[in-house]
Image (tube, grey):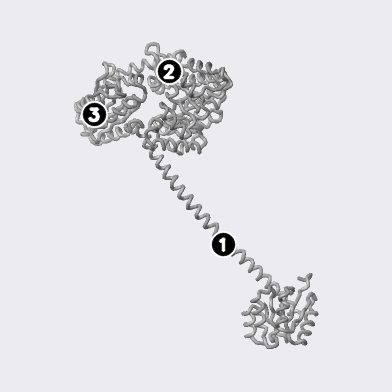
Amino acid sequence: MADKEIRVLLIEDDEDDYVLTQDVLSSCPENSFSLEWAAAYGDGLNALRCGRFDVCLVDYHIGTRTGLEFIAEAIAEEFKVPYILLTGARDRSIDIAATRVGAADYLEKSALTSGLLERSIRYAIRHEEDLAALREARCSLAEAKDQLEIKIRQRTKELLETNESLKFEIAERKRVEQLLRHNAMHDRLTELPNRELFVDRVNHSIGRTTRDAEKSFAIMVINLDRFRVVNDGLGHRAGNEVLSVIARRLRDSVRPGDTIARLGGDEFGVLIEDVSAAKSALECATRLKKLLDQPLQINAQSVYPMFSAGIAVSSLGYCNAESMLQDAATALAYAKSRGKGRFELFDVSMRSNTAGLLELESDLRRATAEDDQLELFYQPIMDLKLDRIAGFEALIRWRHPERGLLTPGDFLQIAEESRLIVPIGRWVHREAARQLRVWQGHAPAHARLFMSINVSRHQLDDGDLIDDLRRTIEATGVEPSDLKLEITESLLMIDPVKTSNVMNKLKEIGVELAIDDFGTGYSNLSYLRQFPFQVLKIDRSFIRAMALDEEDLKVVQAINSLAGVLGMDVVAEGAESAREVECLKQLGCRYVQGYYFAPPMEAGKVAKLLDDNREHKEPVSAESYKLARTG
């Protein structure tokens, strides 16, 4: 404060005391004070109203009024100056009263010196500044508190709304996951337990018989002998209706404790609990056969199904369900070899029939080595948004010199078990990439066609997979991203860590990865983020049921939305009707494949279609492609 003049107002009715005070201030070491005198109570208040003083000295006696009254009234008017009370008497009560009304200090005139007065003034000014700062801080704090309360109320509202949204999202996700888990253990068409659940229940029954020797059971594997005739003659929808009717008949014919399952395709399994002997199992099979042999009415046409069945009983001492299923399947094969339309009870002598499987494996080894019997068929994948063919899925066929054209269901199991699938897979990659590059070169409009290729578990285990793909890409000149490797959902559970490592290496070389048959395996939604997938293929079982069941429609919608959030493309498999395609369009599903557009075709037929459209210099539209196919 030494460099600033301090303006002092003295309220004093005695002129001598005014002169005395002026002399004391003049003798202050800093001599930085200016003094103004107000001799009357009202004059003092008027002077303060001008707002030009830094401190106010107030005598205890001001005419008929007191300095305490003056200070109280000045503070009430909120003059922002400190007040020092001057009195001629030493009275402790006055000191206390001065403090109570708001005076900054209390001085006795008889003891007044320049040093004491200067120190008191400067202290009072600093005290007033501190009080002003404190008032400002309190005001700011109050404002901040109000703003904070507003923000808290707003944030609380937002959190409550978010919480409700999260509750709904969690409930919806749980519902979808529960439905997916249910679907993972049940067949979508018939709602029967699937193979995985059937195996689990057979293993439980084996455990019971192990603990109690008096307990016994049997299983049957049932197969429709002429189901392919129904499919080819009446179409896949009629075939599905046949399977659904058979499933209902089987469900209605067994006891509550028994289990009916669809093992795959046109094959069913029956678990018959608590049978006393093989004879009881044969009696049950006879009863089932009579029921199943009844004709079916499909599309106003009578269909007479024929069935073959193989039976295995637990008395042979099985350790696991797969062994028992294999023996029941062997008995089924034996029944078919003896003319079909019959059932057989397994005995160990039937195992010699596996020689036929060994012969087929030998033929497959020869076909793989000679590289002249294997062939790729291609099923188009349509882009509904752009109304054109977006790419193809490569599907292997085997032209057996004696058995004719075999589909994957006829030989892939043998290829997997013998690990022939590894060299076969390498050939598929090379041939599919080569064929894709040829088609891409037909016209600029076809330059972005892609190729989807299935990958098996043994191929993922093959240490040369990555290098083989690199060599294939370099040799054919295809863009790595135009190759989409499809990995079935069930493979993710076998060795998730190893599978993830291989998939990351595949992603590094640029190929895209698709999760196939989504919703049919054991995996959950978290796997979509754990593995580096770019494409999700919705299993055909969802698509078939979607157009008829609102719950299934919601599942497809949820899967499609989830994939969109994760930045994945979606391909719907198995579309067979215009209604299914229209549903997929409404759900915003962009890519679709299925018999509605085309079955898998030989490369020559695909090339002809692309050649016919080359002169238009634009991709083949879905509608023109349908017309070309049906025409």
Please give left or right for residue 573 compared with residue 107 in the image: left
Q: Is residue 35 visible?
A: yes
User: Which mark is drawn over residue 315?
Assistant: 3
Nearest-to-viewer mark from 2 and 1: 1
Residue 313 drawn above or below residue 476: below
Residue 418, position in %: x, y? Answer: 40, 21
Q: Residue farthest to the top? A: 401
| Quarter of the N terminus within the rendering | bottom right
Residue 418 drawn above or below residue 18: above
Q: CA distance from mark 3 to mark 1?
A: 82 Å
Rendered residue at 24%/33% (across/down): 273
The secondary element bearing badge 3 is classed as helix
User: Which mark is drawn over residue 146?
Assistant: 1
Please give left or right for residue 474 compared with residue 487 in the image: right
Residue 431, position in %: x, y? Answer: 50, 18
- First-in-chain label (2 vs 1): 1
Mark 2 lies on residue: 397
Residue 570, position in %: x, y? Answer: 48, 32
- First-in-chain label (3 vs 1): 1
Q: Are marks 2 and 1 in contact (CB under 8 Å)?
A: no
Q: Amino acid at mark 3?
A: Ser
